[in-house]
Amino acid sequence: MNWQGFEAAVAQRKPVFWWRDDDATAVTPALERLLKLSQARGIPLALAVIPATAQPALFSRLEGAVDVLQHGGDHVNRAPAGAKKTEFPQLEAAAAALERLAKGRERLKALAGARALPVLAPPWNRFRADLLAELPAIGLQGLSAYGARASAAPAPGLRQVNTHVDIVAWRQGKRFVGDEQALELAMNCITKDEPIGWLTHHAVHDDGCWRFLERLFAVRGARWASAAELFSYNRPAHV
């Protein structure tokens, strides 16, 4: 997929896009660049913040259309040796996982105020299915993972809005995946009945990542929605 074909498809279908960036904890040059790009292009940003290590100065820097999502509890890998990384393995007691999440939720609310949405973006986009129904009881009403969602409501009182295009090639030196692959991932979702989520990780972006975002944000025809809108029960019917 090239830019010409992608721009033509977007102009025809007018999809809903949204942007999530993971692993925020502090104000860094990369985060400053991310925020300035969001502000300059008028693109709403959902910043997934790690509660346990978030620095208070981060939140005083946020302005404009920036929502804060909860990026797990402490972003510590608890998976057994050889298993895929996750903060929430099946072997951990459910009560311990939920307690960590509840503490993280309260800390983000205290630090970020109204910007802190009751939405969990689990580290490595993995979360235990058996705990989904428990999230509303600790104040989490939304879930954001990766890939096509099985349901917009995976449990009572819980709304799911996923990301679909990770622009970082994690197994190839944490470099930009390339225009062709990123655009192809988006095109695979453009006919599906859900907003297309673009996933970034500002701390590891190379020049290719930043150039791609600059061009993506200039594409005409898509509507960029905020996380606050997509996770709201007053959302437009078509998202």
Image (cartoon, grey):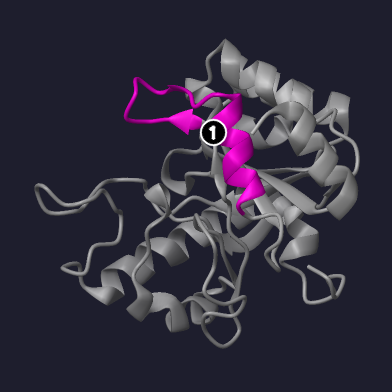
Say whether residue 35 is visible: no
The residue that appears at 37% across and 48% down in the rendered structure is 74
Which quarter of the figure is the N terminus placed in? top right
For residue 185: magenta? yes
Using residue 41 as the reference point, say whether residue 187 is left or right of it. left
Using residue 27 as the reference point, say whether residue 226 is left or right of it. right
Label 1 sits on what residue type?
Gln
**Residue 152, image x and y in percent?**
62, 75
**Residue 212, image x and y in percent?**
67, 23
Q: Quadrant of residue 76?
A: top left
Q: Which residues are magenta?
A: 168-188
In the image shown, does 4 or 227 lie closer to the viewer?
A: 4
The residue that appears at 58% across and 11% down in the rendered structure is 207
Which quarter of the figure is the C terminus placed in? bottom right
**Residue 12, image x and y in percent?**
88, 50
The residue that appears at 67% across and 59% down in the rendered structure is 117
The residue to which callout 1 is attached is: 181
Say whether residue 215 is visible: yes
- Residue at the far left: name it: 81
Looking at the image, residue 198 lies above or below residue 126: above
Q: Secondary structure at mark 1?
A: helix
**Residue 31, image x and y in percent?**
62, 24
In the image shown, does 155 or 113 lie closer to the viewer?
A: 155
